[in-house]
Image (cartoon, grey):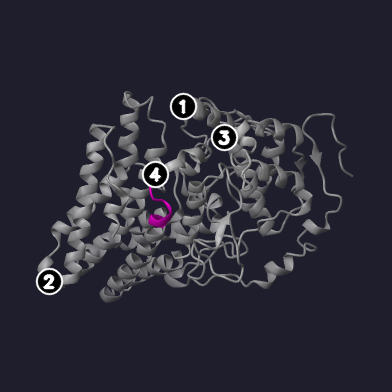
Amino acid sequence: MFAKHAASAIKRTQPSTLRRFTKAHHPAAAVINAHPADNSLSSVAWTNPDPGSEFTVSSKSGFLPRRDPLHVLPSYFEKLDEILHEMPILKSDGTLGLLHTGQLGARVERELPQYDVEFVFDMRILAALYRDYSMLASAYLLEPCDIQFRLTRNYGLGRRMLPSNIAVPLQTVAHRLNQKPCLEHSTFTFYNYQRKDHDMPISLNNIEPIRKFSGCDKEHNFVVGHVAAARHTDKVIDASLGILEAAQNNKRDEFNAALRKYSTAMGRVNEILAQTLQGCGDYASFRTFLNGSKAQSMFNRGVLFERNSSTEAHNYLGVGQSSSPIASLGTHLFQLSQLSPRGSLPCNDGVDLLRAPNVRSFLEHVDQQARSLGVQSYALRSSESSAEYVLALGQVLTYRYRQWANLRDSVPVQSARDNAAFHAYLDVQTSHVRDIAKLVSRTHASMDGESLGQSVRTRAESVAHHAEMVHRSLGRILNDAESAPLPVSMIAY
């Protein structure tokens, strides 16, 4: 019935009984069926194509999963759970973990069974396994880079071969979820939290990460901050669809109201991130593990998956080279991709293709609708709409600038500051932020300020002033990499 264990370091493990992992017999299957499909977004004719997925996009849960993530795996995966618990550089009990001592790789190769996940159909378990295997894969591949970085501030080379006891189940789970076998931004953040009190709502004080790389405070804040901020994406999504619908129906007052609603919701998102991502501090202590295998010096030939029928190397962007779907939504909604065809966009280079199917479909829909309706040109045909558009872009700029500032401070620039490649890197990484700042300034300059109310005119002027400060600051950094960037707090509206 099942193949016997081979006499090798990596074992293949099968479940003693399959009933608890099948669609028909898994006890959680009834729970899934008991939840109606969340297709609450009816504006501009879009629904979730895969309503059974843990990640649906709705004006109810926003970009967060429709249910809290599974934080304890079934007992069958006991060894996987144990290794992940022992993995962080600093464990929750204050002791040093496998990544601190550089023993994770040997432990995985020696002790981790090759679990058979072919019989797992429960979507909640699949999503948890995808999170756990993708994080373990990143930790295994980048462990040598983290050790090298701590010693020399250079990454060196990562492991090139992902062993079959990670690669095989990761590929199986990813295929079943219609995602790529890599660590994606929402997986590391939005599907990596648990509530301390299940009767209380998601908040900064009521959630904590499930899985960690470093165990440091900044990693905790990074995950918790993104989750708490995403709680408000229901309103961001609702406002985004309202903008599209109003443009479609040529209802100017409703368009302006939807822009205001977007700015207010994104303002709340940025406020929460400002509380949790103040400065980078020891961001670098876990940033290593957020690198992908695409266009990275530590994987100059990509990554190979052991026992894969294809010998082609895998190349994927990591969490550190991408962004949350919040950034992609703003880029698509306001047609910002045309600003920076060569720049580091949250939706360029296939980042959106890594996202969960429903999220991917939603972002594609918004992009198509915004292009078809000409949201940007529609906004610029009215002074009041232009002003509200500037205010909305100000929130997008704040979000994107914060992302860039955190990235900059985590890059090992000590050995690269005298290198032309570092200047090119800064140029590409900042181009989109600079272009948004220029768009804000241009839009503000073309407005008929006299026709606006005092409050709107004053706020639009403030946003334009801060955008100009951002543009000058980034230009100064391009000329002198040693220059300190403008503090994010100075462009928070």
Q: Is residue 84 magenta?
A: no
Numbered disc in front, either 4 or 3: 4
Which residue is label 4 attached to?
Answer: 406
Residue at 45% x, 28% y is 153
Range of the magenta residues? 273-279
| Residue 429 on image: x %, y % | 35, 39
Q: Which mark is residue 16?
A: none
Q: Identity of the amino acid at label 1? A: Asn
Residue 13, x across and y down, in percent: 81, 42
**Which element type, helix, strand or loop, lies under badge 4?**
helix
Q: Residue furthest front?
A: 94
Camera-side residue: 133 or 487?
487
Do the residues bearing badges 3 and 1 touch, measured as CB atoms within 8 Å? no
Circle 4: residue type:
Asn
Give the amino acid at mark 3.
Answer: His
Q: Residue at x 47, y 72 (%)?
A: 42
User: Closer to the N terminus: mark 3 or mark 1?
Assistant: 1
Quote the CA–CA distance across marks 1 and 4. 18 Å
Amino acid under disc 2 = Ser
Q: Which mark lies nearer to you, 3 or 1?
A: 1
Distance between the alpha carbons at the discs numbered 2 and 3: 55 Å
Q: CA distance from mark 3 to mark 1?
A: 23 Å
Q: Could one spot residue 175 in this view of the protein?
A: no
Q: Is residue 204 toward the left or the right of residue 131 in the image?
A: left
Q: Are marks 1 and 2 in contact (CB under 8 Å)?
A: no
Q: Which residue has dot 3 on it? A: 314
Disc on the earlier residue, 4 or 3: 3
Residue topped by disc 2 = 451
Asked whether disc 4 touches disc 3, contact meaning CB atoms under 8 Å apart, the reply is no
Question: Which residue is labeled 1 in the image?
Answer: 154
Q: Which of the marked residues, 1 or 4, is nearer the chain's N terminus?
A: 1
